[in-house]
Amino acid sequence: MVAVCDQVVFIKINGRADFNLSLDFKKLFQELRRRGYGRFVLEARNCLMMDSTFLGMLADVALRFCNADSPLGFPLELINPNPRIAETLENLGVAHLFKITHSPAASGVNYEPLAQAGDKSKTEVTRTCLEAHITLMGLKAENVQKFKDVAQFLAEDLKRLESGDKK
């Protein structure tokens, strides 16, 4: 669910935030940044879990914002993550990339469903998954051991898919 209020983008994450949503979120962030939006508030009160691909994609987005030296401080704010998500953020070494707060739900925010791309290719999804895991491995040495096999599999799968796409 997405809403824009006073140049702030509010995104409500419900249910499972996993690799299936990662590409749609990545495209959403890219499009809204292209339109000039610089502050994003992610409401995670109803988010049950975030998988490594989704967290890696969010970390990549946060790194791109941080590298842009945003005058807004933390352009990505994560509100009300459950304890499991907060612990995962810490364990993967990405918590410092977000302003994490606990507060009541924003009132007066009129959310609309996020349009999901129906034409996602397996190649595009695999590339997003690989990029997310490479980001996580670059952020914390311990993540290399956790994700090296996944990244290797994804890289090999991506190579196979790309060679198949060209035929």
Image (cartoon, grey):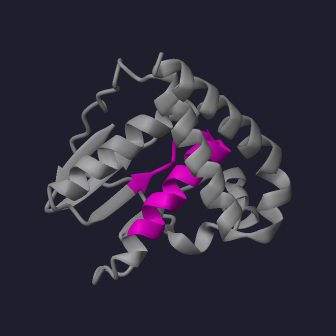
Relative to the observer, which residue lies in front, 85 or 147? 147
Write the residue at 34% across / 82% down: 69
Write the residue at 36% across / 81% down: 73
The quadrant holding residue 25 is: top left
The quarter of the image holding the N terminus is top left
Q: How many marks do you count on the picture?
A: 0
In the image, taking residue 86 as reference, residue 78 lies left or right, namely left
Residue 80 in percent (x, y) is at 52, 57
Residue 46 in percent (x, y) is at 52, 40
Can residue 55 be seen here? no
Residue 43: within the magenta? yes
The quadrant holding residue 41 is: bottom left
Write the residue at 66% across / 59% down: 136
Relative to the observer, which residue lies in front, 84 or 97? 97
Residue 2: within the magenta? no
Residue 147 in percent (x, y) is at 78, 50
Relative to the observer, which residue lies in front, 108 or 82? 82
Q: Which residue lies furthest to the front in this view?
A: 167
Residue 54 in percent (x, y) is at 56, 45
Can residue 58 be seen here? yes
Write the residue at 37% across / 70% down: 65
In the image, taking residue 144 as reference, residue 56 lies left or right, namely left
In the image, taking residue 8 as reference, residue 103 lies left or right, namely right
Q: Give the range drawn in magenta.
A: 42-64
The quadrant holding residue 6 is: bottom left
Relative to the observer, which residue lies in front, 162 or 83? 162
